[in-house]
């Protein structure tokens, strides 16, 4: 595993200059790689949408090096947000708060809220501190596709369009940040991530789950997102071998993402054992799906992951990556947390 944690001074200066010139810079965070622009330059932010093929109604997260300039972006910081910032920033938590008046509509999709995150990755910190302002950044992938967790993933999609790609090695978490919003009724979980619901509850007392009618839109959550090109199906855990066997009948090639080795070898099956530890499974998920997507198979079958909150973010991403979810009676095929 490659771990490059710090960029050179020259790399950071080049990236900062690119941001100042209105260009895009891809950079590592501990969750996934971001595709960044100067958040105060609307033309540069618009470029992000163009390059990604992302609809303009999907708002972006603004990244800061610390909460010290939060008031430039946020009108009122809710008390519970201040508390969560103390506990989880810098880190994999994004907070949706009331936007300050001068924040550009291109970032927020015209909503009256703004999403803010203070990432912990040392290279993201170096870049943000040297730049000295907010960097608007979605994940550095084309709209609807798998998020990048290595610089080479970004290069595969954007080598021609993004001149500066900071290489910080493999992202340690590998799944996008947890997102929360603040409503009159309390704090609401909008996207599960490695900061778990229980951890947030521990900090603020309670947590609302599922979108309310009044919740801000999280357009990153249409049903198919974070998806490989090969059709992906989540199958009940105990049926993975039988389904792989059935799907490969007649010589069809099938790719499998499981949590153990196959019970016996299947002739036309490419099998990845991603293990039973949610941290490692999550860190490797997008890389594994990319590998399986390139394996020349007609179908990807994913063994449903266990119940339990440590698997929530993984279960959420798998269901979004899925083109179909096989019915099961053990609860593993149900859609969780987000609609
Ligand atoms: O880990 C992450 O969060 C990565 C790294 C680069 O920070 N970023 C990321 O960005 O995943 P993106 O754009 O791929 O996903 C951000 C999500 C989207 O679903 C977007 O709709 C939602 O955050 N979002 C942004 N601003 C929002 C707002 N004001 N209200 C509700 N949702 C918002
Ligand atoms: Mg994304």
Image (tube, helix red, strand yellow):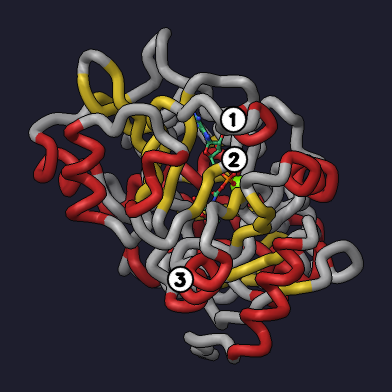
Side of 183 relative to 202 (left or right)? right
Say which residue label 2 marks.
Answer: 60
Residue in the picture at 53% in, 78% down: 170
Q: Quadrant of residue 88?
A: bottom left
Say which residue label 1 marks.
Answer: 108
Residue in the picture at 82% in, 65% down: 162
Q: Residues within 10 Å of mark 2 (few under 14, many from 20)?
A: many
- Is label 1's Cβ within 8 Å of ligand 1? yes
Proximity of marks 2 and 1: CB atoms separated by less than 8 Å = yes
- Is label 2's Cβ within 8 Å of ligand 1? yes
Q: Is residue 129 above or below residue 235?
A: below
Residue in the picture at 40% in, 25% down: 98
Q: Which residue is most to the top?
A: 213
Q: Residues within 10 Å of mark 3 (few under 14, many from 20)?
A: many
Between 317 and 153, which is closer to the camera in this rendering? 153
| SS type, badge 3 | helix
Instruction: Point out the tag, 1 or 3, that comes first from the N-terminus.
Output: 1
Side of 4 relative to 336 (left or right)? right
Q: Is residue 129 above or below residue 298?
A: below
Q: Is residue 15 above or below residue 137?
A: below
Image spot of residue 101 (x, y percent)? 51, 25
| SS type, badge 1 | helix
Mark-to-mark CA distance, 1 and 3: 23 Å
Q: Which mark is residue 142?
A: none
Between 199 and 120, which is closer to the camera in this rendering? 120
Image spot of residue 281 (x, y percent)? 42, 66
Say which residue label 3 marks.
Answer: 125
Image spot of residue 292 (x, y percent)? 68, 66
């Amino acid at each position: 595993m490659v771990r490059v944690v710090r960029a050179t001074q020259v790399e950071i200066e080049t990236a900062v200059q690119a941001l100042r010139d209105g260009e895009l810079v891809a950079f590592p965070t501990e969750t996934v790689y971001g595709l960044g622009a100067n958040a105060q330059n609307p033309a540069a932010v618009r470029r992000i949408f163009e390059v990604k093929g992302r609809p303009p109604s999907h708002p972006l997260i603004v990244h800061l090096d610390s909460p010290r300039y939060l008031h430039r972006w946020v009108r009122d910081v809710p008390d519970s947000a201040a508390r969560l910032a103390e506990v989880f920033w810098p880190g994999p938590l994004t907070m949706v708060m009331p936007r300050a008046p001068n924040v550009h509509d291109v970032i927020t999709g015209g909503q009256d809220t703004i999403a803010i995150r203070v990432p912990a990755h040392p290279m993201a910190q170096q870049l943000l501190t040297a730049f000295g302002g907010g960097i608007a950044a979605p994940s550095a992938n084309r709209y609807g596709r798998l998020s990048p967790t290595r610089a080479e993933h970004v290069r595969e999609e954007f080598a021609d369009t993004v001149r500066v790609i900071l290489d910080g090695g493999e992202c340690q978490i590998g799944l996008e940040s947890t997102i929360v919003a603040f409503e009159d009724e309390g704090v609401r979980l909008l996207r599960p991530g490695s900061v778990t619901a229980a951890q947030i509850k521990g900090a603020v007392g309670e947590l609302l789950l599922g979108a309310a009618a009044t919740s801000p839109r999280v357009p990153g959550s249409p049903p198919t997102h974070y998806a490989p090109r090969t059709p992906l199906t989540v199958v009940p855990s105990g049926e993975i071998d039988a389904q792989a066997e059935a799907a490969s009948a007649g010589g069809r090639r099938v790719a499998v993402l499981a949590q153990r080795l196959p019970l016996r070898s299947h002739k036309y099956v490419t099998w990845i054992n991603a293990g039973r530890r949610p941290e490692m499974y999550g860190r490797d998920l997008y890389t594994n799906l990319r590998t399986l997507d390139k394996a020349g198979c007609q179908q990807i079958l994913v063994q449903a992951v266990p119940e339990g909150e440590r698997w929530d973010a993984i279960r959420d991403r798998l269901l979004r990556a899925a083109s179909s979810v096989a019915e099961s009676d053990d609860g593993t095929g149900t859609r969780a947390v987000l609609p």
